[in-house]
Image (tube, rainbow, N blue to C red):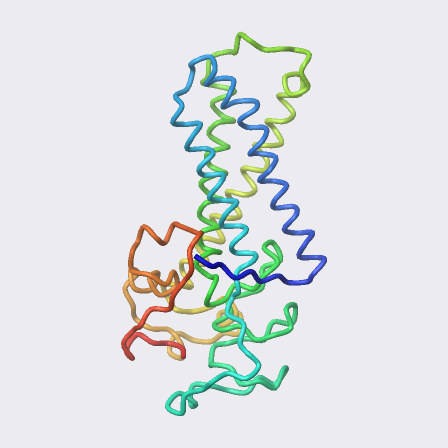
Amino acid sequence: MKLRLHFVVDPMGWLCISVVFGIWLYNTFFIPKLVLLPHYNEGHIPWAIVVCYYIASALCLAALFRASTADPGRLPVDPNIPHSEREHWELCNKCNLMRPKRSHHCSRCGHCVRRMDHHCPWINNCVGEDNHWLFLQLCFYTQVLSLFTLVLDFCQYYYFQPLTGLDQEKFTTRHELALLRVSTLMGLVMFGGMTSMFYTQMAGILSDTTTIEKMALFSKEIYGSKKSWQWALAEVCGTRWKLLWLIPLRNRQPLQASHHFRTHV
């Protein structure tokens, strides 16, 4: 499996994605250090919870890496346009290159992207036709990891039995309350923000409308279409196999749809 990497040179984007990675690293290090591993060692929680937390953390990081480095659908300088599909293409007034309709020119990246939804500074990349499914995965796995973290923080205060083998000289033990409060605040912010973003993205996918089109007040009569939710998500993820919708380490292949379902070239 060959995964092509795509990097955007943007210092502000680098700063934003560093903040996101720092939040992930903080919770991935301190939650096992303060909650998971000590309670597992004393037999308060089963090993399955520890494994599930690390799996959720790994999938979240993989989705972040793939969403930020995957090509969102950048158009080539000299595209090969079939004669039968030329009516579905238009000239970009910013880069003077031909592009399919519903493409958009990103001022941050400096090129046109097929079916661009928006430019996200938190992944330092555009969200377009070829990486929209990865951005959706990132929102989903961030929700899962944030909720997992909040549940563990709550259980640490109100449910888990007191630990007997604490070493009061250790930094993490002496500052446990402050560290868990920071973790709880991060979890609340990330879960609330990602839940809102995930809902917005799903609504756009099911209505076949991008964020840019909504902001430009494009109506559903122009671009929207009636599709089942299975087909709408299959088009975005590039496969009809629902299990593969959740796996970030793969390549997306456009589905061959009938003309009735096609909304772009």
Write the residue at 61% across / 35% down: 26
Q: Position of residue 233 (x, y in %)?
A: 35, 60
Q: Residue farthest to the bottom?
A: 83
Q: Position of residue 140 (x, y in %)?
A: 44, 48
Write the residue at 37% across / 66% down: 207
Q: Relative to residue 223, is residue 188 depicted above or below?
A: above
Instruction: In this rendered view, identify the residue nearer to me: 154 or 75.
Output: 75
Write the residue at 39% across / 87% down: 85
Q: Relative to residue 152, is residue 62 depicted above or below?
A: below
Left or right placement of residue 23 versus residue 155 in this view: right
Q: Relative to residue 6, is residue 172 depicted above or below?
A: above
Instruction: In this rendered view, identify the residue nearer to me: 233 or 86.
Output: 86
Quarter the C terminus occupies: bottom left
Q: Residue farthest to the front?
A: 1
Total marks shown come to 0
Q: Position of residue 242 (x, y in %)?
A: 30, 53
Q: Position of residue 43 (x, y in %)?
A: 42, 14
Quarter the N terminus occupies: bottom left
Q: Residue farthest to the right?
A: 11
Left or right placement of residue 228 versus residue 221 in this view: left
Left or right placement of residue 94 versus residue 143 in this view: right
Write the residue at 49% across / 59% down: 3
